[in-house]
Every structure is written in structure tokens, then in C-alpha cells.
Image: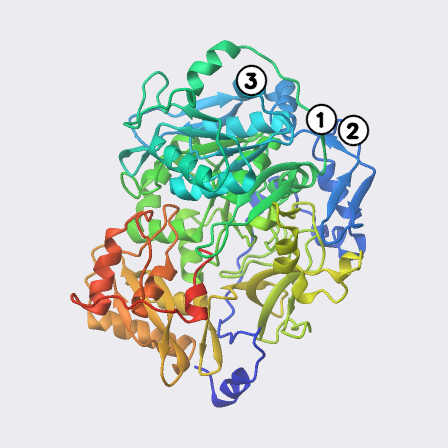
């Protein structure tokens, strides 16, 4: 528990600094067996990518991909902070992910598709077959649809092989693809169509989710109508069929606008399309961030720099070899799926698993059965999924004969207790873990251990990735020293090849959001004057490892003490009965804001006052009495997005007697009303009114 002097010090920190109460965890060493086969066992890797070697150190990544024409400049800063990487070079992402592997790996599986119905056998697509399918789709998009380099096309596709195939077909032509996560509504898709200026939508009739064949085509009509109302006309809607030749939707096809991809492709069987040599700086894709407030940001990624960065990090950090069977459980609708299901692994000639459904259907043993059957040896997933699997099947992994050499965690900070379950139970004490931190805007990993080089520490992302040089700055732009126990805004001193190019159609917002905060000379072309501000709070330990504390918005200011919500949630998860925890800020007359805690219990555990008392005590013991929650609610389940993230914004609205907004797109919308009644009472009506700014923003990164 914090003593009095520490508390006094915390009230004096600047607005950027967050009170930090994390205890440092023990180290775990990478297994010798892993080190012996690692792509990057050199302990001097970070020296080789030191700031004094920047930017030429990234030639090492550029050398991992194939160029049609060599680049002449590694980094062009002439229009800072709109960085241009490997200028002068000509490259094609589709060629790098498919064609160049044919000579050696043509009969090796590129993609293994696992449908959600367990009675359907996995489908392996070899590199040779992928080559044919990508070429046929590219020929159809070019010759029938009329798409050409620089055009935009929107996808609203789930996790089926048609998504990476269509991505690679667009990349072959230089067409900019914009995938909208399949779980998003038709309206959300429509706004992204409008913003990107797409005239073509690629979708699917249906797909499996939690045992239900979802009618996905219904979203297409809403998307097209939404875009039309916003001034963007869609000429064609191209519809893949989950089961070719059988229409799996009750939504009628629109004559003259909607076309079945399977039918169109019959005319293009065996057609070949030469990959278009693209400028290294040509956009490859747009990825829209999914904040709950404000206009979505179209994050624009380049071709050459992005591809080099995801190839290099997939090789050195994910340790992917061509012989590996690699499974990233993310959705390709997010940046993790683009970088580390499609472009990174396929560029390295790996076998990448694409799984259609929910990881806990029909039960929590499903992932481990898939891993056993396919011989998966690298697993990549998010703390959300790890917590869910730990909650529903804590003993399931031991029942299956799979063996991982490497496991990744991505998407949010992972609580130390959850990390240990991942390491001991899922990894069977055999696998190395990389706890990675990065964002949609970044293209690839920013903070992570290099797996064969660094020790692992639960809850810590590790140092900067090779060539990435983070710094924690306070409100005045002063560096917060390592080991000080104080947090601030984590920034990156230098650009890197995977960094976004701009926000599509809004360069001013790009500069304002990511660079203006700490830039002292807007006219400078020196990269040193443009630190990238990530918008996350972090603390750096004396060993130079970073611990990410979550979004700067996800901070509760309790009587001058800025408490990171992630450390409160982590304290809750030290209680053995607790499976999931969510912390939200609640208005309080005396202290301004106080934390309110929602917890979900492990299966078979009954709610009791004793568990509530344990949660309160855990926060007081680990953080201090300042973190004592106003209430602790034991809920049947957390309100979650289709991707499994807890919607803390919804919980904050309930706690503060506000309107929860539209929850129909959640994976479990009915639980919202159950929680509302629990918190507000059966007859309570949510008050409408202006929400305090810090609560309105809370959890918007979800």
C-alpha cells in the first residue's frame, strides 16, 4: 500500500503523468530450444538498429522483399511529417506474397481455412492455387469492373479465404483496398465507402458466427444506401458465396448492381495478370479506426515501407520460418490481420491459418483442437481472447497434444496473472511470449521483446522493437526518466517504414493528432523535431522495459491522483474467482471521479459479498485506498463488440445514468439491459443530458 509521501508526490504530477502502482514482476528466460532455431538470436540486434544507425538500419528489412526497381533514398523527410520510405523503388505486394514463392514452395499450403462448423474439414490452399485464384480475381476486377491503380474498393468481408485473395488481387493491380470489419454494421460500412470514394463494394452472402449462419448480404444494401445519402454512388456490389452455387441470404440481389463473384470468375479461369510495379510510396490500403465518437480516420499505409516492415518484424519478432504453421486469431478486419495474417506471413512463405468463427464455439477446447490437428506452432492472439478462454476453459489446453514454440499477445496490455496462465497452461512452459504494443497507425510492432534475445516479464511490453526508439514525455515535453515510477505520454522519437502515410483526405488532422503536440518547429524537415505521439500512457522501468497503461483517455482522476484503469483491472484479476474486469469513471461530489468496477466470474463460481470484498481489498493492497471503488458489480457477462472487446463506454454510461446509445451491433446486446437494471433499478430511466467530457471519451478506442 502506498505510504503518505508517495501519495503527496502523486498529487503533484503533471497532467500527462499517471500514478503508477505496478509491482515489477519476475523474469522468464526464452527456452534454449527456441533460441537455437530463431531467425534473430543476435544480442546486438538493438545496437545494429540503434538511433545512430537510423534510417539506414531499415535497409535490412527492405532487403527481405523483392523489388522490380531499386530504391535510391531510404527516408525522404522533405515534407515532414509525411514520411516517404524507399523512394524510387518499384514493388508489388501481391508478387512478394505469392509469385516469388512458386519456384520453391508452390505445393506448400499458403492458407489453411478452418470453417466454424466442426464437421467441415479444413481447406488448404497451396501457393500455386493461391497464385491462380489471385490472378483470376485480379483479371475480373480489371477487365469486368474496370479497376485500375489508385482506385479504391471497399470490402465488407468476414474471415474466409476470399478476403486475403481479394486483398492480394487488388494489390496486384495497385488498387487501394479498404476492408471494413465484418462485424460492423452496414451503416458503418457506408460511411467508410463515402470517405474513401469507393465505387465498388465486395461482400459475402453469409458466414458462420457462434453456430449461426449470419445473413451478411443484408448489410450491403444498408451500406450502399448510407453512402448514397452521403453523396457517394456505388456502381457494383460483388458478392462472394460462402457455399459456391448456393445463395445463403434472404436478401434479394439487386438487378444491374449486385453480381455473384463465383459466376463472374467462370469467365476468367486460368487468366494471368502481371503484377503492376508500384512506387514504394503508393498507397496499399486504407484501414479505418473504429472510435465510438467522431468521424472514422482512414489510416493510409504505403506499399514498400509497410511491406518491408511487416516482413522484417514477422521474421524477427514472430520468428516465422517457411516451415512454420502460424495462426493469428485476430480478424483480418483489423490491422493485426492485415499485417500478421496476410502480408507479413505470406511474404515469408509461411502457412497462415484463417479461422472463420468464434474461438469458444462450440466450446473452449476449439482452439486447442485446431492447433493439434493442423500442427500449429506459432499462436498470435489478444488478451481479450486469452481472458475469455481462461474463463471458459482454464484446464482445456492440457487435454490436447499441440506444442507452440512462440506465442504473441497484442491489442491491449495483458495482466500479469493472465500472462502466467498463457505461459504455463497454453504454452506448456515451452513457448516464448512476445507482448507487443502498437496501433493501426503503426503498421507493425513498436514495443516488444526480441524473442531469442530478451527475457520476458509479465505485463511489460519490453523495449522498443529493432529500430524503434520510444520516449516518455510529460506535459512540457520533458523526458520522464526510466525507473522514476512516473508515467507520461509514450512517443516515438523517429519514423519507421511501417508508419502511416497520412489520414486519407485529411492531412491537417494527421499532423494535429499525431505530431503537433510535441513539435516545436512546424517548418522543420528534420525527423528529430517530429516525435510521434501515440495517445497512450506508459511507464518505463529501470530495466528499460515499457509497461503500457492504456489510452490517455482511460485515466480516472481521483482527487488529483491519475489512476490508470488497466492497473485497477489487473488488481481485480488477482482475485482467483474473477475472469474479467472492467473499470469506468463515475462522477463523485467529493473526489470528482471515482472508479466503479464490473466483474464477471469464472464458470461455476457463485456471486457473493465475499468476492466483492476480495476485489476491494485487492485494489487497496496493490494500489492503495485511493483506488477503492464506489461499487463493485458482479455481472453475468460484459457487453462486448463482435471482436470480443469489452465496451467500457456502455458501462460508463450505465454507471453515470446516461443513455447507452445503439448497442444492437454488440455480440451480446441483451446483457446491457440486465446490467442497467442491476445498477439503476428496474424502474430507472436513463437521464439524458451532456456527459462530462472525460466520461464521454472513455473507452472510445474500443
Report which quarter residue 260 is drawn in.
top left
- Residue 149, placed above or below residue 142: below
- Residue 674, placed above or below residue 430: below
Alpha carbons under labels 2 and 1: distance apart? 8 Å
Q: Residue at x 59, y 50 (%)?
A: 441
Q: Nearer the viewer, residue 374 or 100?
A: 100
Looking at the rendered image, the disc whose residue lies closer to the viewer, 1 or 3, is 1
**Residue annotated with mark 2:** 69
Would residue 71 appear left or right of 467 to someone viewing this image? right
- Residue 446, placed above or below residue 165: below
Would residue 696 appear left or right of 469 to someone viewing this image? left
Q: Residue at x 77, y 34 (%)?
A: 89
Report which quarter residue 224 is drawn in.
top left
Q: How many neighbours does mark 2 have within 10 angstroms: few (below 14), some (14-19), or many (20 or more)?
A: some
Q: How far across and down, in percent of the image, does residue 318 sit?
A: 57, 43
Q: How far across and down, in percent of the image, does residue 538 sit?
A: 56, 66
Q: Nearer the viewer, residue 570 or 673?
A: 673
Q: How far across and down, in percent of the image, does residue 181 sit?
A: 44, 41
**Residue annotated with mark 3:** 128
Looking at the rendered image, the disc whose residue lies closer to the viewer, 2 or 1, is 1
- Residue 437, placed above or below residue 90: below
Disc nearer the start of the sequence (3/2): 2
Q: Nearer the viewer, residue 343 or 642?
A: 642
Disc nearer the start of the sequence (1/3): 3
Q: Are marks 3 and 2 in contact (CB under 8 Å)?
A: no
Q: Are marks 2 and 1 in contact (CB under 8 Å)?
A: yes
Identify the element where label 1 is drawn. loop
The N terminus - image quarter:
bottom left
**Residue annotated with mark 1:** 277
Disc nearer the start of the sequence (2/1): 2
Identify the element where label 3 is drawn. helix
Amino acid at each position: 500500500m502506498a505510504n503518505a509521501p508517495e501519495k503527496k508526490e502523486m498529487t503533484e504530477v503533471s497532467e500527462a503523468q499517471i500514478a503508477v502502482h505496478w509491482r515489477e514482476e519476475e523474469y522468464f528466460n526464452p527456452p534454449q530450444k527456441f533460441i537455437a532455431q530463431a531467425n534473430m538470436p543476435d544480442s546486438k540486434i538493438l545496437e545494429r538498429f540503434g538511433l545512430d544507425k537510423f534510417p539506414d538500419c531499415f535497409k535490412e528489412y527492405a532487403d527481405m522483399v523483392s523489388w522490380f526497381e531499386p530504391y535510391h533514398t531510404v527516408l525522404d523527410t522533405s515534407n515532414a511529417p509525411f514520411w516517404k520510405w524507399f523512394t524510387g523503388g518499384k514493388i508489388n505486394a501481391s508478387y512478394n506474397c505469392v509469385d516469388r514463392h512458386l519456384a520453391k514452395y508452390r505445393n506448400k499450403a499458403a492458407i489453411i481455412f478452418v470453417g466454424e462448423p466442426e464437421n467441415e474439414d479444413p481447406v488448404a490452399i497451396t501457393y500455386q492455387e493461391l497464385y491462380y485464384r489471385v490472378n483470376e480475381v485480379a483479371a475480373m476486377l480489371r477487365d469486368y469492373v474496370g479497376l485500375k491503380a489508385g482506385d479504391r474498393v471497399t470490402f465488407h468481408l468476414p474471415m474466409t479465404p476470399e478476403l486475403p485473395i481479394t486483398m492480394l488481387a487488388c494489390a496486384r493491380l495497385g488498387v487501394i483496398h479498404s476492408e471494413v470489419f465484418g462485424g460492423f454494421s452496414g451503416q458503418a460500412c457506408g460511411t467508410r465507402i463515402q470517405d474513401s470514394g469507393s465505387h465498388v463494394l465486395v461482400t459475402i452472402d453469409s458466414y458462420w458466427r457462434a453456430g449461426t449462419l449470419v445473413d451478411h448480404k443484408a448489410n450491403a444494401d444498408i451500406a450502399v444506401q448510407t453512402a448514397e445519402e452521403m453523396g457517394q454512388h456505388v456502381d457494383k456490389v460483388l458478392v462472394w458465396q460462402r457455399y459456391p452455387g448456393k445463395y445463403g441470404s434472404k436478401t434479394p440481389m439487386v438487378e444491374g448492381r449486385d453480381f455473384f463473384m463465383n459466376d463472374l470468375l467462370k469467365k476468367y479461369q486460368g487468366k494471368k495478370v502481371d503484377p503492376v510495379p508500384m512506387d514504394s510510396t503508393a498507397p496499399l490500403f486504407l484501414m479505418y479506426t473504429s472510435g465510438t465518437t467522431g468521424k472514422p480516420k482512414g489510416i493510409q499505409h504505403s506499399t514498400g515501407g509497410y511491406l518491408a516492415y511487416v516482413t522484417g518484424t514477422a521474421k524477427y519478432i514472430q520468428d516465422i520460418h517457411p516451415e512454420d504453421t502460424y495462426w493469428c486469431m485476430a480478424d483480418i478486419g483489423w490491422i493485426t490481420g492485415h499485417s500478421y495474417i496476410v502480408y507479413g506471413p505470406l511474404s515469408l512463405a509461411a502457412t497462415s491459418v484463417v479461422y472463420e468463427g468464434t474461438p469458444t464455439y462450440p466450446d473452449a477446447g476449439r482452439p486447442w483442437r485446431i492447433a493439434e490437428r493442423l500442427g500449429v506452432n506459432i499462436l498470435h492472439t489478444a488478451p481479450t481472447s486469452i481472458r475469455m478462454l481462461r474463463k471458459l476453459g482454464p484446464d482445456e489446453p492440457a487435454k490436447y497434444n499441440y506444442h507452440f514454440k512462440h506465442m504473441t499477445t497484442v491489442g491491449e496490455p495483458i495482466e500479469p496473472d493472465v500472462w502466467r496462465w498463457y505461459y504455463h497452461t497454453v504454452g506448456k512452459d515451452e513457448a516464448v511470449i512476445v507482448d507487443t504494443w502498437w496501433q493501426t497507425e503503426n503498421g507493425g510492432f513498436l514495443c516488444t521483446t526480441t524473442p531469442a534475445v530478451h527475457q520476458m516479464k509479465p505485463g511489460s511490453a519490453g523495449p522498443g522493437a529493432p529500430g524503434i526508439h520510444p520516449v516518455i514525455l510529460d506535459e512540457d515535453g520533458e523526458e520522464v526518466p526510466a525507473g522514476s515510477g512516473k508515467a507520461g505520454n509514450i512517443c516515438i522519437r523517429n519514423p519507421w517504414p511501417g508508419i502511416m502515410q497520412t489520414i486519407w483526405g485529411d492531412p491537417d488532422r494527421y499532423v494535429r493528432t499525431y505530431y503537433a503536440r510535441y513539435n516545436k518547429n512546424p517548418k522543420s524537415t528534420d525527423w528529430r523535431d517530429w516525435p510521434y505521439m501515440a495517445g497512450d500512457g506508459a511507464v518505463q522501468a529501470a530495466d528499460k522495459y515499457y509497461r503500457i497503461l492504456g489510452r490517455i483517455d482511460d485515466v480516472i482522476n481521483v482527487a488529483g491522483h491519475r489512476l490508470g484503469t488497466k492497473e485497477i483491472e489487473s488488481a481485480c484479476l488477482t482475485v482467483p474467482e474473477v475472469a474479467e474486469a472492467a473499470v469506468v469513471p463515475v462522477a463523485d461530489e467529493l473526489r470528482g471521479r471515482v472508479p466503479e468496477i464490473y466483474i464477471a466470474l469464472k464458470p461455476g463460481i457463485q456471486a457473493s459479498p465475499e468476492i466483492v470484498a476480495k476485489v476491494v481489498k485487492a485494489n487497496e493492497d496493490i494500489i492503495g485506498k485511493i483506488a477503492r471503488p464506489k461499487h463493485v458489480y458482479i455481472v453475468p457477462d460484459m457487453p462486448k463488440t463482435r471482436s470480443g472487446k469489452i465496451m467500457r463506454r456502455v458501462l460508463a454510461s450505465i454507471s453515470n445514468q446516461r443513455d447507452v446509445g445503439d448497442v444492437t451491433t454488440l455480440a451480446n446486446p441483451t446483457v446491457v439491459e440486465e446490467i442497467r437494471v442491476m445498477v439503476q433499478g428496474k424502474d430507472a430511466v436513463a437521464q439524458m443530458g451532456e456527459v462530462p467530457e472525460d466520461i464521454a471519451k472513455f473507452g472510445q478506442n474500443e
